[in-house]
Image (cartoon, helix red, strand yellow):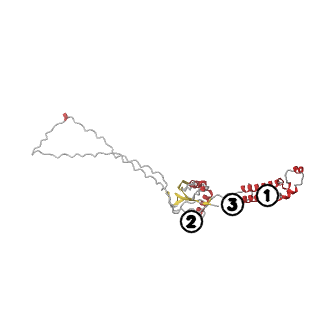
Amino acid sequence: MNTGFSFTNQEFLLIAGAVVAGLALLIFAVRMYFNAKSGSTLAEKHKMQHDAARWEVRNKYPEVDVFRWSGMFFRIAMVAVLVVIIGAFNLTTYERQARIPQGALDLGEMDIEVEPPRSAEPPPPPPPPPPPMIQEVPNETILDVQDVEFLDQSVEATTAIEAPVAVERKPEVKHAPPPPPPPPAEPEHEEIFKVVEEMPRFPGCENLATNDERKACADKKMLQFIYDNIQYPAIARENGIEGTVVVRFVVEANGVINNAEIVRDIGGRCGEEALRVVTLMNSMPQKWTPGRQRGKPVRVWFNLPVKFILEYN
């Protein structure tokens, strides 16, 4: 039922009080009127009437018959009830709403425990070289003692001794050990930056001239998106929970948001609500403008504060 107007709680209470006061005043006036008419005048007027004539009427004094006014009282009661019903249907309650506060993106000096991004594990050390190959040495030929002729090896002072003839020995050819296997290829890992030359931005402001203008426009649009889609959790509103939730996420090189997590919560399901709105950004037609380092799009951590402030009407 919509009549084109609405009442607040205070206005509805004033209207209901006025209706009750009006009905009480009407009842008091009617009672005063009947009390005035039912005095000694009516008693003297009907004293001389015949008893039979007096029994023909329903009331002792027809002049003060209340039932004659029942139709009017019924209409007045219906009007009063209708007014109360219309007021109840048009009663407008104003809940405490969240608003965009001043300095919504200011982290300030808050102590946020942020786990540093995990770097890539160092590659394993190369395997040790293989052990040297043991070459098999052939067994020496065992001479038959029967074929050996023993010579006299006694030497005297007059015996001439000839120097032995040096026999050239060819160096033994040693086989080189096989080369060690190549080390395993390092896994591809893109570093996640915390601060870059050009930080990632909310989409929709790339047509502006300077980087400062684009950043100011992107921050404004991001706050508008957040507080247009956020819903103050009922449990936090009922318990008067206010504060700042910080959500951290990675803006990928293609503008997609990943690894969103709550790094600071205030309770009352405010952290879950802020995380839901951040995840909702991936469903936008345009993706974030990625951060750039040396002109190349890179992955960047982004800390987003979401402030919950109750507004009382």
Using the numbered discs, state the Cα–Cα distance from disc 2 to disc 3 in whole angstroms.
48 Å
Quarter holding residue 254: bottom right
Quarter holding residue 277: bottom right
Picture disc at residue 212? 2
Image quadrant holding the N terminus, namely bottom right
Q: Amino acid at mark 2?
A: Asp
Report the residue at 84% width, 58% height from top.
40
Which label sits in the foreground, 1 or 3?
1
Q: Amino acid at mark 3?
A: Gln
Left or right relative to 112: residue 12? right
86 relative to 176, above or below: below
Query: Which residue is the site of mark 1?
Result: 31
Q: Are marks 2 and 3 in contact (CB under 8 Å)?
A: no
Between 196 and 103, the residue placed more toward the observer is 103
Q: Amino acid at mark 1?
A: Arg
Q: Residues within 10 Å of mark 1 (few under 14, many from 20)?
A: few
Image quadrant holding the C terminus, namely bottom right
The answer to whether one can see residue 17 in this image is: yes
First reached walking from the N terminus: tag 2 or tag 3: 3
Picture disc at residue 10? 3
